[in-house]
Amino acid sequence: MFKQLGLIGCGLMGGSFALAMKQAGLVERVIGYSKSPSTTEKAKQLGVIDQAAESALLAVSGADVVLLAVPVAATESTFKAIRHLVSPGTLFMDVGSTKRDVVDAARRALKDRIGAFVPAHPIAGKELSGVQHADAQLYREQQVILTPLPQTRPELVEKARALWGALGARVRVMTPEAHDAAFAAVSHFPHLLAFAYFTGILQQQEAEEFLRLAGPGFRDFTRIAASDPAMWRDVLIANREEILKQSEFFRGALGVLEQTLRDCEGDALEALVRGVSEARSHWRMGSGRPR
Ligand code: NAP
């Protein structure tokens, strides 16, 4: 049980965390700071926060748990603004989709106070942003990845693990590097691909007619192309090296499929599709390599 959550960034992820903590009875009070006063006002009206703070530092004052739920590019300036109140008596976490840049930013800003920070990435979300979409159930039965550093205090990692667990999430611990490589493959590159694919359609004269005819397969495949532009600018740039590596694997696989089409090799094409189809039909969220 925590006395006070200091929430910095009152949007979808931060708002959902505050609501989930309240619903689980894990916090007495939530003090929120966000870049726009209209956002904290809305968060208050929605019952996400109990009180608005005028600065990030004031949101941290008196908190025993602090969540940074800002765009990843705002991590360093946020940590610099609160650094004087960062101490091991309080659990500090983030929710950023990339971890190497977040950890580097935290190291630069917090210096010898870095031990209080437990980097976290909930594998949950929506293509909708803003506190009006906050949902107390967002993290239930989803994974949360923690990427502690050698300096991170072990008791805070355990506290973070227990807190996310109490919100119904499954917690995994890995290095920031392993995290960024994995999520480039299963999240960041697919977003880049969805943006590119939809762009390719929009560039055609018949785009409107094509889109009018599209069905559920197209809707499912392109859902993530409607994601928040500012958030994805930050994520794609922060993890560009790993994303570009994934792009190479994709181009290789696409090249093989294109060549079988050019050669009109029906049997080869069917064998390729069968292999993928079987692998995908065995895959379940949370399971590893398909048999
Ligand atoms: P969001 O709904 O747009 O919320 C972000 C909030 O932070 C907004 O309310 C925003 O501005 C505020 N903000 C921006 N810069 C700030 C600053 N310097 N100081 C204080 N507040 C600031 O976005 P989100 O989806 O919650 O994303 C937040 C983080 O979660 C990102 O780091 C993202 O990588 C991570 N994440 C997102 C998802 C997802 O599916 N959305 C999934 C996993 C992780 P205003 O105050 O102007 O409203």
Image (spheres, grey):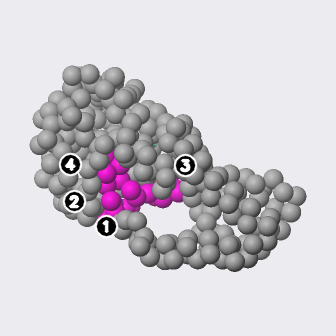
Helix or strand or loop: what does disc 1 sit on?
loop
Q: Earlier in the sequence, mark 2 or mark 1?
A: 1
Measured in 3D between alpha carbons, the distance from the residue under mark 2 to the one under mark 3, in whole angstroms, is 31 Å
| Residue farthest toward the right in the current orientation of the protein | 205
- Ligand 1 image-quadrant field: top left
* Label drawn at residue 160: 4
**Badge nearest the viewer, 1 or 3:** 3
Q: Is residue 138 magenta?
A: yes
Query: Type of residue at label 3?
Result: Gln
Q: Earlier in the sequence, mark 1 or mark 3?
A: 1
Measured in 3D between alpha carbons, the distance from the residue under mark 4 to the one under mark 2, in whole angstroms, is 8 Å
Query: Type of residue at label 2?
Result: Gly
Residue found 42% across the figure and 51% down from its top? 182
User: What are the residue bounds of the magenta stretch?
Assistant: 120-145
Q: Earlier in the sequence, mark 3 or mark 4?
A: 4
Q: Is residue 211 magenta?
A: no
Q: Which residue is mark 1?
A: 141
Residue 197: x %, y % from top left: 69, 56
Q: Which residue is mark 3?
A: 246
Residue nearer the viewer, 107 or 126: 107
Asked if residue 273 lies left or right of residue 145, the reply is right
Query: Type of residue at label 1?
Result: Glu
